[in-house]
Image (cartoon, grey):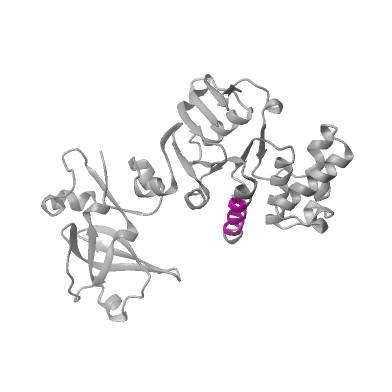
Amino acid sequence: MITFENITIKYDDFTAVENLNFEVKDGEFFTFLGPSGCGKTTTLRALVGLNYPTSGRILVNGKDITKLPTEKRDIKMVFQSYALFPTMTVFENIAFGPKVKKWKKQSIEGKVHEIASKVDLDVNQLQKKVSELSGGQQQRVAIARALVNEPSILVLDEPLSNLDAKLRVQLRNELKHLQKNVGITTIYVTHDQEEALTLSDRIAVFNKGKIEQIGTPDEIYEQSLSEFVCNFIGDNNQLTSLVSKYPDRFSLLNQTDFSKFYSRIERLKIIPESDSFDMASDEVMFEGEIIDFEYYGLYTKYSIMVEGTTLHAVSKEKLQKDMIENKKVKIILSQNDILQYK
């Protein structure tokens, strides 16, 4: 278990992270998520020992490692660029650490083959130069090199950010499989919301050096605790102007304690203006006009002008041609799906 206790990191007068308190469980895939400059990489580097906290403690299984040198921490890091030796073979890259530590040749060979098997690298690939490998294979080599010394913790700093979109999706699926297969505690840093939601057991959302929320992907998305988390994760409609204009129609909302209201775009229903429907007690309906739409294959995203506010809705079914040409639609939303903030 990794424990951060009251961690603050300052550079002169600038506070990079302030008073962080959280725990990472054994075997967990735990993600630091946030925009550039929010403190997530600074926090990761403190765990690895590449910088030191100004105050507070970092513990691993109850042992204080706050001031321990990097090489004495049982932690291995995979960098954004993988930092492999391109002229060496895959075998030589993976064996580099054990050779530096002067393991016996037989032990090195056995361990390299064992780790290579775990990350789906075959015997033929071990003999290839790293420069001959695909991006996905290079990622597996980088992870194998980190795992060969059997660290208790693996950390990855935006390892997919330099890849094209299709390869990123492929490799994050492989990465999750590898982590579960090896069973190692993993800390992952990313600014990509989709990556965080699909990979993580739990997510810490960073903002301006502080953690706004820690939770499972479902909790972060469905029960965003702050306006920042709500806006950073997923696509939203801001409903504040509609609620202010028609407070009586939103009677189920707490308009005394909260003044900002949002709804995920997939929560809105869109139907032709002429269609009749039975509205549930928690639902409200507005008439609107389609002003734009974007076709994504699996779904279409519509922009709809409602009472001077642009709302967005998605539909997996194609709307009728006459509906799009007529542009008049009805928008239905449940008050129970509305997120409320001060």
51 or 123: nearer the viewer: 123
- Where residue 92 appears, as percent x and y from the top left, is 83, 45
- Over which residues does the magenta segment extend? 168-177
Quadrant (top left/top right/bottom left/bottom right) for the N terminus: top right
Q: How many marks?
A: 0
- The outermost residue toward the right is 105
Q: Is residue 282 above or below residue 270?
A: above
Judged by its main secondary structure, the magenta piece is helix
106 or 238: nearer the viewer: 106
Q: Is residue 172 magenta?
A: yes
| Residue 321 figure quarter | bottom left
- Where residue 301 appears, as percent x and y from the top left, is 37, 65
128 or 237: nearer the viewer: 128
Q: Is residue 308 magenta?
A: no
- Where residue 186 appears, as percent x and y from the top left, is 59, 41
Q: Residue at x 63, y 31 (%)?
A: 48
Q: Is residue 182 above or below residue 265?
A: above
Q: Is residue 39 above or below residue 31?
A: above
- Where residue 103 appears, as percent x and y from the top left, is 84, 34
Q: Residue at x 82, y 31 (%)?
A: 101
Q: Is residue 48 left or right of residue 260?
A: right
- Residue 144 in view here: yes
Q: Is residue 19 left or right of residue 333?
A: right
- The outermost residue toward the left is 248
- Residue 86 in view here: no
